[in-house]
Image (cartoon, rainbow, N blue to C red):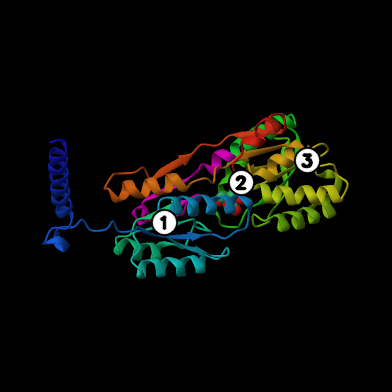
Amino acid sequence: MRWMIAVALVALVGCSKQSSDNKASAPSGEANAPAAAKKLVIGFSQVGAESAWRTAETKSIRGEAEKRGLDLKFADAQGKQAQQIQALTSFIAQKVDAIVLAPVVETGWETVLQQAKEANIPVILVDRGIKVSDESLYTTLIASDFVEEGRMAAEWLAKKVNGKANIYELQGTTGAAPAIDRKKGFEEILQKYPDMKIIKSQSADFTRAKGKEVMEAFIKSDGKQIQAVYAHNDDMGLGAIQALDEAGMNPGKDVTVLSVDGVKGAFEAMVSGKLNATVECNPLMGPLVFDTINKVRAGEKVPKFIQNKDQLFEQTNAAQVIGTREY
Ligand code: AHR
């Protein structure tokens, strides 16, 4: 008797399994089957690989795209706007679902962004802003407030040097938002301190090699007059430290050095006493970038500026946090 019940049960289960399988591959199968989810195609035009910060940003965006199974078309512009425009033109021709652009400079984007707009492709700016007469040419900017970073740096320096110093400034790439804004915020605060003066200021293109080269020239012309160095990024600051070291000028002690970014190398230099402070600028944008793209595609309104919050680190807290730094 028992075996008869078992056979009946097996037959029943078999039937119901068959009927549910049939649902997925019904005779009219092809038409009713759920379409395989289409992989999102995103074009990412990156400035280049000029700094440790930039490399961290690229890694974050590429890593997150991979994690989410997206098709990310990556184009490294090697610091050239013309190459970025070319990359965007090609993304538009390929009808990508969205474009992520880290613009090397602020101006000159109208034509290509107009083409993206006409093709209905949302453009997400990351880390650097642009100047356009029509703000609808891009969807949103995800970035730090560079002017605020400049202010933070100057306020910290004013305290450190008691409102008196000959300052030497290493600017970022000419025409780039972080170079313009970090200078602007810094100078705004200096207005309150008449004895803090920028004696010389020159672009070193956000690279360590140029930071060293420009600092060597400053040392050659002004030597012991140099009391403080403000570098628009850590790479240039680290290059300046090397030049000061080689000239026997004691960076971190006789010459106060501060920079922006908060990369691992800056923390190591603070722990070893050569860099005095760094203002963090968070490059780990991957998750936020793709969450934002999803929102835009779902028709949600996103703010025009999505701000990353930053903080300043100095020698006194560097050793404590160095182990927790992700970039
Ligand atoms: O746009 C962000 C800046 O660009 C970073 O501070 C710098 O390191 C980079 O190259």
Using the rendered image of the protein, determine whether residue 138 is visible from the camera's viewpoint: yes
Find residue 227 and report its horizontal and vertical position in percent.
Answer: 79, 40
Using the numbered discs, state the Cα–Cα distance from disc 1 to disc 3 in whole angstroms. 40 Å
Q: Nearer the viewer, residue 45 or 20?
A: 20
Residue type at numbered disc 3: Lys
Query: Few, some or many C-alpha atoms within 10 Å of disc 3 (few <14, some 14-19, many ≥20)?
Result: many
Find residue 113 and report its horizontal and vertical position in percent.
Answer: 38, 62
| Above or below 16: residue 151 | above
Query: Few, some or many C-alpha atoms within 10 Å of disc 1 (few <14, some 14-19, many ≥20)?
Result: some
Circles 3 and 2 in contact, beta carbons < 8 Å? no
| Above or below 186: residue 111 | below
Local secondary structure at mark 1: loop
Q: What residue did someone put label 2 on?
A: 183
Q: What residue did someone put label 3 on?
A: 274
Q: What residue did someone put label 1 on?
A: 132
Residue at position x 53%, y 65% in the image = 77
> Over which residues does the magenta segment extend?
126-149
Using the numbered discs, state the Cα–Cα distance from disc 3 to disc 2 in whole angstroms. 23 Å
Task: Tell whether position 134 is magenta.
Answer: yes
Q: Earlier in the sequence, mark 1 or mark 2?
A: 1
Q: Earlier in the sequence, mark 3 or mark 2?
A: 2
Local secondary structure at mark 3: loop
Using the rendered view, name the quadrant where residue 110 is placed: bottom left
On the rendered image, what quadrant is the N terminus found in?
A: top left
Using the rendered view, name the quadrant where residue 150 is placed: top right
Q: Is residue 56 toward the left or the right of residue 285 in the image?
A: right
